[in-house]
Amino acid sequence: MDLVKRMLAGDQRALARLISHVERNSREVPAIMQCVYPALGAGYCVGITGPPGAGKSTVTDKLTACARQQGKTVGIVAVDPSSPFSGGAVLGDRIRMQQHYLDAGVFIRSMATRGSHGGLPQTAKGVVKLLEAFGKELILVETVGVGQTELDIVETADTTVVILVPEAGDTIQAMKAGLMEIADIFVINKADRDGAERMLTELRLLMHLHPKYDWWEVPVLATQAHKDIGITELSEAIATHRRTLEAAGQLQMRRRAHRRKELLELLQHRLLQDLLAQLEQHDTLQELVEQVQDAIVDPYTAAQRILAVKKGDADGTY
Amino acid sequence: MATERKIRVLLAKPGLDGHDRGIKVLALALRDAGIEVIYTGLRQMPEQIVAAAIQEDVDVVGLSCLSGAHNYLFPRVVELLREQGAHDILVIGGGIIPDSDIPELKAKGTQEIFGPGSSTADIVRYIKEHAPRKS
């Protein structure tokens, strides 16, 4: 594919165009991803997540500056929510990263969730792959401001950083499932605020008393990102996590799990599209759908019959 | 299965304007019209605006200038976009633009100007009618 060739040769506009293809799931996507696949493998993906207003974009901006000082190139995917009313969005993360606009070593792409509910658009994985193929060594993915259950980021990131603010609550909050479980590193940003010290102590105690892994104790760091305080330590913690993951064989395991999930999602999507297309062409099945809608047949019976027909078609016995 | 195409608009404040209330109002109107809006922030150089427009693969760049430097800044953004091969990005402008400056701005590539008193509904309509359909 010409566009892919140009991207692999370093053309930013080609990269941006390819990202747009992936973003809207165009017909060219399978061919694009097939072309791009061999160029993957050298990037490292860090997820930055946390509630709205915690400072994710500022931390992303500062980590990027840190990485650039180390000579690394950076790709950033910054996500904001799509309106459930209009489908539009205000993508306001990039505005916090202005120092990098003219740095050719940094590529920033803003994305809207476009209907996904897990904190990332469904197409984010593909965009991360494009950035990796383009040659970005570090890829930062900033999710929307999440609550307790939007956890898509763990399926894409190698290291997940959860950013909290001191007002985020007490130990009971920290014990709740969901967001508090996915952190490889916790950051308490705006740490000059009241409650930061206490939260730091309580969270560290919890991580120590109830470790998630036997090969990694989740560190809890304090930062004031807009003042550049704590950023170097965060960067080092990410590097340490990466080394630990690699040494324990966990990076391979995580990536294997990601790839399997991706395949299953793709299959699920394709199979459903196929089935829906078949339903439309098959008169008897269409009738069955109508009967379910009219409450003449229950959906369980209908599903069994539809799948039996589909299987029958496949076996050639229908 | 392809999803419905979204229009992506970059809103930018080139030059030294001190406030951005107007462009923020426009951003909300575009959002409510189903458009994905990227706002780059105040005090942008044309180079920064163009870099962002390319990376974000936007359909439209909307420039706002209140401090009078539009005759240099708007054509400069158009020029830089064309240098980067982005001829297909629609450039429109607004802010405090004297009527007498509009013909030259248009001749130099800013396709439409929406001065003070423009309705956001008109801007939305214009964008929806004129944003390029990319392949």
Image (cartoon, coloured by chain):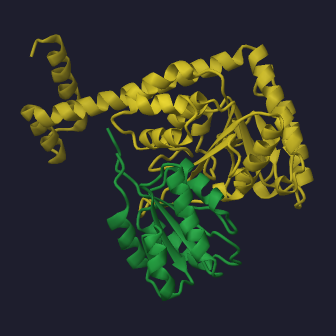
Chain colours: A yellow, B green
Is residue A274 rendered to the left or right of residue A282?
Answer: right
Rendering coords of residue A257 (x, y %) = 57, 21
Q: Could you tell me residue A309's position as x and y percent?
A: 15, 22
Q: Position of residue B113 (x, y in %)?
A: 46, 77
Number of numbered markers: 0
Rendered view: A56 above or below A312: below
Residue A90 shows in this picture:
no
Q: Is residue A178 visible?
A: yes
Question: Who's the residue at 88% across and 54% down the image?
Answer: A196
Q: Nearest the camera: A72 or A246?
A: A72
Which corner quadrant of the image does residue B12 belong to? bottom right
B50, A225: nearer the viewer: B50
Query: For the point 75% across and 54% down, which residue is it?
Result: A99
Q: Is residue A200 left or right of residue A6?
A: right
The quadrant in which the N terminus of chain B is found is top left
Q: Quadrant of residue B41?
A: bottom right
Locate the C terminus of chain B by quadrant: top left
Residue drawn at point x = 38 percent, y = 25 percent: A267
Percent of width and height locating residue A214:
80, 20
Q: Residue at x 57, y 38 (%)?
A: A152
